Amino acid sequence: MDAKGENSLALFPAKFRESMWIRRGSFVVIDHTGKEKAQESGSKVTSIVCKVLFFEQIRLLQKSPEWPEIFRDAKPVPADESSQIPIPQDDDIDLSDESDDGMPPLEANTNRLRPFGVQCDAETDSGSDSDS
């Protein structure tokens, strides 16, 4: 949604795709210089994402007069909250046998060799030198 309250579809460039994710409610800066031309050609994509705003940047912009009035009530999602994935409670997990769909239990893969465990002794060779 832009400052006028109009919804539009923006292209997320490849330079951002591999390095960051945006989610609903995030703020971005878009370039819509070719918006009229795109709408005339019938394209749904009318703008391009230029910059993704982070929590600190949004806070600073909200305090400035350049922040659009339509976004004044919107609260940015801090990075800590956006990265959290809800963990199901024990009550939500169904451990019944019905979810197995009649499949036999899993067995160990005998075709793969298990790596040998490295064991470290608490005593070293230097300890035997002190005994002499």
Image (cartoon, rainbow, N blue to C red):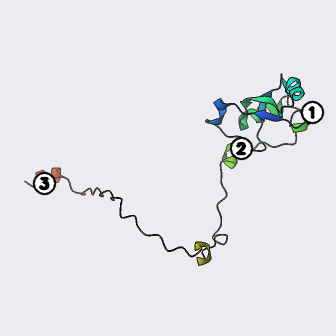
Q: Position of residue 10 (x, y in %)?
A: 79, 33
Badge 3 is on which residue? 128
Badge 1 is on which residue? 4
Q: Position of residue 67 (x, y in %)?
A: 85, 31
Say whether residue 119 is left or right of residue 63.
left
User: If you read the primary sequence from the N terminus, does the residue marked by circle 1 or circle 3 appear first?
Assistant: 1
Secondary structure beneath disc 2? loop
Relative vertical location of residue 46 with respect to residue 117 in this rendering, above or below: above
The residue under label 3 is which amino acid type? Ser
Residue located at (73% from left, 44% from top) = 23
Say whether residue 41 is left or right of residue 15.
right
Asked if the residue at tag 2 contacts the one at tag 3, i.e. Cβ–Cβ closer than 8 Å, the answer is: no
The residue under label 2 is which amino acid type? Pro
Say whether residue 51 is left or right of residue 8.
left
Tell me the mark number nearer the camera, choosing from 3 and 2. Answer: 2
Badge 2 is on which residue? 78
As measured in the structure, the alpha-carbon distance from the residue carrying label 3 to the one carrying label 2 is 57 Å
